[in-house]
Image (tube, coloured by chain):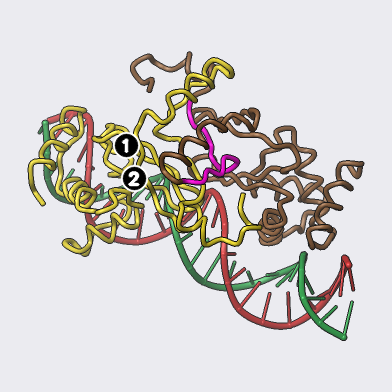
Chain colours: A brown, B yellow, C green, D red
Amino acid sequence: MSDERVRTILDQLRRQGGRVTGPRRRVIEAMLASPSHHLTAAEVVSAVRVDDPDFYESTVYRTLDRLVELAVIDRVQLGPGATIFHLSHRPHRHLVCEHCGEVTEVPADLFDELAERVNAEHRFFLRSSASTLVGSCERCESSRPRHERT
Amino acid sequence: MSDERVRTILDQLRRQGGRVTGPRRRVIEAMLASPSHHLTAAEVVSAVRVDDPDFYESTVYRTLDRLVELAVIDRVQLGPGATIFHLSHRPHRHLVCEHCGEVTEVPADLFDELAERVNAEHRFFLRSSASTLVGSCERCESSRPRHERT
DNA sequence: ATAATTGCAAAGTCTTTGCAGTTTG
DNA sequence: CAAACTGCAAAGACTTTGCAATTAT
């Protein structure tokens, strides 16, 4: 897991003025290794503790905060509870199923029209990477009783 | 504050199968009285404790949960931390400034196009009342250093 | 060298839960 | 009366903070 992609991201980190340390490397490796690429802080903690059982939670939180500042990762709130983090090297937007929690990545241009519209009509500057669309994935939708549907 | 609107909402509550109790009445009065109509659970607690200093937090959380189930209020996640609640009798959507926290209500049809599009392209059923647009209000945007803008 | 970062412990905020007693419909 | 609800206490989930020691540049 210490491949090309890790180095690219560490370079970005360094260019932005951040320091490359063991813990940061491990956090980034964990995020790259995760199949979903969308992790809560707690999931990062678990992932990282596989190799380093003494890794502290506070280090994870501070590392994630710093990586957000440095634009290496993004922080997105997907409903109540867990804030999630993902590497920001591949721009995309999120659909979140409020029933099963599934996160779907969709192309970043999805919000383009809406962004223009809220800007024109409400003088609001949309940050669409932070704006999550909440709803129901197809599987959950078809298994829900009709009268509960929104 | 025990006017017409309170009674209308209590009727709705009863029709949905909920029971009208002192605590519920006070929670609804507090939400109607709030200028913003968008309250966190903690704000409901404070509001309600003005008249009833022994009001328990757990009662507020349980009451809000139940009112959400009964479709009397809506729960919306506005970024990290605060879950907010508002009466659902007047449909609208939310723009949230991530710098100052200001919540702007906008017409419910704002998401119509986008909803069709995610449905057609991603088989996703958008619940737009739960989908918050995050960005920057005009005031914050113009006071932010240009290089920080997204 | 010095500013950034981590280890560690403690605490803070927001929310949920269990159970006994009370109240509503 | 039965089911729903509240009071109260305790705990759970998630996150932040302070300070001393360490490390990257």
Q: Which chain hosts label 1?
A: B
Q: How far from the left and from the top, in percent, is residue B132?
A: 46, 39
Q: Residues within 10 Å of mark 1 (few under 14, many from 20)?
A: some
- Looking at the rendered structure, the secondary structure element under dot 1 is helix
Q: Which residue is mark 1?
A: B68
- Looking at the rendered structure, the secondary structure element under dot 2 is strand
Q: Amino acid at mark 2?
A: Phe
Q: Quadrant of residue A30?
A: top right
Q: Which residue is mark 2?
A: B85
Q: How far from the left and from the top, in percent, is residue A114?
A: 50, 33
Viewer-nearest residue: A98 or A135: A135
Viewer-nearest residue: D14 or C19: D14
Asked whether residue B3 is drawn in magenta, I would say no
Residue found 79% across the figure and 63% down from its top: A17
Report the span colored magenta: A124-135
Residue found 42% across the figure and 48% down from its top: B83
Q: Residues within 10 Å of mark 2 (few under 14, many from 20)?
A: many
Cα–Cα gap, marks 1 and 2: 9 Å
Q: Is residue D5 placed above or below A67 in the rendered structure?
A: above
Q: Is residue A4 placed above or below B54 in the rendered structure?
A: above
Q: Are marks 1 and 2 in contact (CB under 8 Å)?
A: yes
